[in-house]
Amino acid sequence: GLTRLDHVGIACRDLDAAVEFYRSTYGFEVEHEEVNEEQGVREAMLRINGTDDGGATYLQLLEPTRPDSPVGKFLERNGEGVHHIAFGTGDVAASAAEVGGRGVRVLDAAPRRGTAGSQIVFLHPKDCGGVLTELVQSTR
Ligand code: CMX
Ligand code: CO
């Protein structure tokens, strides 16, 4: 099952500026930074709190690496802001199959590589009340 809020993904034009905002305003620190070319993002994970299942909850700050990526298109259309939410699961393939069986479109036929070697799938926002939703099986 889904055991926690893993992260909230936030689209920004300038990752370093967004990181500095969350550091100076709230004191949140970057735990991990990487470029994921498949997803078309440069991203930073800011750890907010630990969770019961030994995982944690993060903010994921996302800067597009190219304009025709999901985050690039989102910024063009909406400007900066909340892009998606992600729920944590111990078995992303099983969770995707379960949710897909309830009529929600799963955008990835097989899990893709997410942050720090995690496995991720996305659910169509039009089947989730307008909220782009990610399921993530963490290695953390
Ligand atoms: N949240 C809510 N709705 C969204 C959305 C978002 N982030 N992105 C697009 N939509 C809506 C659009 O507004 C549009 O609605 P209308 O038809 O009412 O105008 C509808 O979805 C379809 O729009 P589209 O132009 O076909 O959308 P895109 O080509 O931009 O594709 C989506 C949308 C969700 C399929 C695509 O963004 C996707 O595959 N996302 C998953 C991958 C991803 O987001 N990766 C980056 C994050 C990586 C990470 O978290 O690690
Ligand atoms: Co994400």
Image: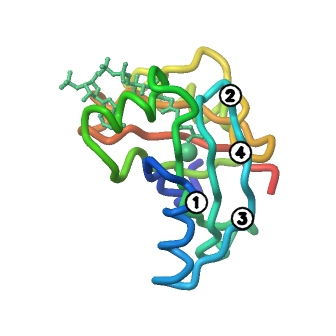
Q: CA distance from mark 4 to mark 2?
A: 11 Å
Q: Upstream in the sequence, badge 4 or badge 2?
A: 2
Number of the label disc, if any, that sits on residue 37: 2
Q: Give whichever of 7, 16 is nearer the camera.
A: 16
| Mark 1: secondary structure | helix
- Identify which amino acid the numbered label 4 is placed on: Thr
x then y, percent, for residue 129:
24, 39
Write the residue at 52% across / 44% down.
Answer: 63
Instruction: Look at mark 3 in the image and give the residue it sits on.
Output: 55
Mark 4 Cβ inside 8 Å of ligand 1 = yes
Mark 1 crowdedness (10 Å alpha carbons): few <14, some 14-19, many ≥20: few
Q: Upstream in the sequence, badge 3 or badge 2?
A: 2
Instruction: Look at mark 4 in the image and give the residue it sits on.
Output: 115
Instruction: Look at mark 1 in the image and give the residue it sits on.
Output: 16
Q: Upstream in the sequence, badge 2 or badge 1?
A: 1
Q: CA distance from mark 4 to mark 3?
A: 14 Å
Q: Outermost residue toward the top?
A: 109
